[in-house]
Image (spheres, helix red, strand yellow):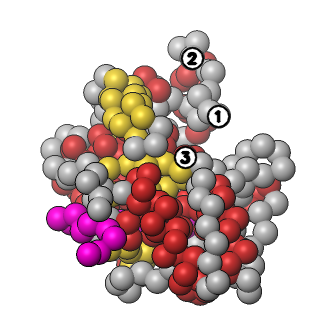
Amino acid sequence: MPLLHTVTEYIGRFAPSPTGPLHAGSLVAALASWLDARAHGGRWLVRIEDVDLPRCIPGADLTMLRQLADCGLHPDEPPTCQSQRSALYQQTLDNLATRGLAYPCACSRRDIENELSRLGREKPRHGERVYPGSCRHGLQGRPARAWRLRVNAGALPWTDRRLGPQAQDVETEVGDFVLKRADGCFAYQLAVVVDDGAQGITHIVRGADLSDNTARQILLQGALGLPTPAYLHTALVLGANGEKLSKQNGAQALDTRNPLAALNAAGAVLGLRVTGASVDDWLAAATAQWAATWGPPGRA
Ligand code: GLU
């Protein structure tokens, strides 16, 4: 009898941005998404999110894939790259614009700051300014720079499998958000939603630093008639300054010469206590532990 049930369909993914090699924090997201897919008898894809080209490091994608392979994390299909998919993002933006859901914006950062201070609303939220909607009703003769989604939703409730009930009023907390940037790059929010939809992703498992994006992504899924996946946002590895570990606060490239040490450290962040003589043994034991907490109901 198999240990794990196969759900009707589960497709998960790990979607790193190739801004450098994987570090201890990115392995946590990779491992959690892999374990969740395996615990559900599902498929696990890797998508290289190289849509923000100015931030990407040439060759980092191959380094990340090798690091994943060293840790026994092999995607079930060849990885896809967002840089190859601009035509689909443009088509989606055109569709939203034709339906009046996306509009061009002429505002520079300075324009937005000026407008917010004119309105007495300069206090940024998490350092990000809430777009005041200046171009909602037209560009007033100014040239278009970016494209934004028109947001009129009120509080949007959603449930995270680990964090429980969440809610965000995107209109008042974020504002009409960018779909295509002034530098011509498609925004993460658009690319991630289009690709999750196109790849039939049913479950998203990623770091808790991304949970704040989820309400925006759910709104966009709704605008595009796409289903909303299940979400699980994992604990984060913190850097010396108490913030999420990142290259900016000193994250070292993950050393996969000793993959069991790397997996043990990532597993500990996920609350797993696993021993294994080989990477495959470790992953099998970790999958069983993960399934006991996060696996499908009615597991044997
Ligand atoms: N590419 C994003 C990042 O590396 C993650 C996207 C996602 O998992 O939704 O932060």
Residue of label 2: 121
Residue 81 at what x, y percent from top left?
42, 77
Residue 91 visible, this orientation:
no
- Type of amino acid at the residue the image marks with label 2: Arg
What residue is shown at x 46% (from left), y 83% (from top)? Answer: 74
For marks 1 and 3, give the one nearer the viewer. 3
Q: In this view, does 216 lie to the left or right of 124?
A: left
Indicate the position of residue 237 as horizontal and vertical percent values.
69, 54
* 219 on left or right of 179: left
- Residue 63: x and y in percent read 63, 84
At 34% from the left and 35% from the top, the residue drawn is: 158
Please identify the quadrant where the C terminus is shown: bottom left
> Mark 3 CB in 8 Å range of ligand 1?
no
Disc marking residue 283: none
Q: How crowded is mark 2: few (under 14 residues within 10 Å), some or many (20 or more)?
A: some
At label 1, the amino acid type is Gly
- The part of the image, by quadrant, that contains residue 291 is bottom left
Mark 2 or mark 1: which comes first in sequence? 2
> Do the numbered discs 2 and 1 sit on residues whose CB atoms are within 8 Å?
no
Taking the image as drawn, is residue 69 in sight?
Answer: yes
The residue segment tinted magenta is 1-17
Q: Which mark is residue 208?
A: 3
Kind of element beneath mark 2: loop
* Residue that carries the numbered disc 1 in the rendered image: 127
Is residue 2 on the magenta stretch? yes
Q: Earlier in the sequence, mark 1 or mark 3?
A: 1
Q: Which image quarter holds the N terminus?
A: bottom left
What element does badge 3 sit on? helix
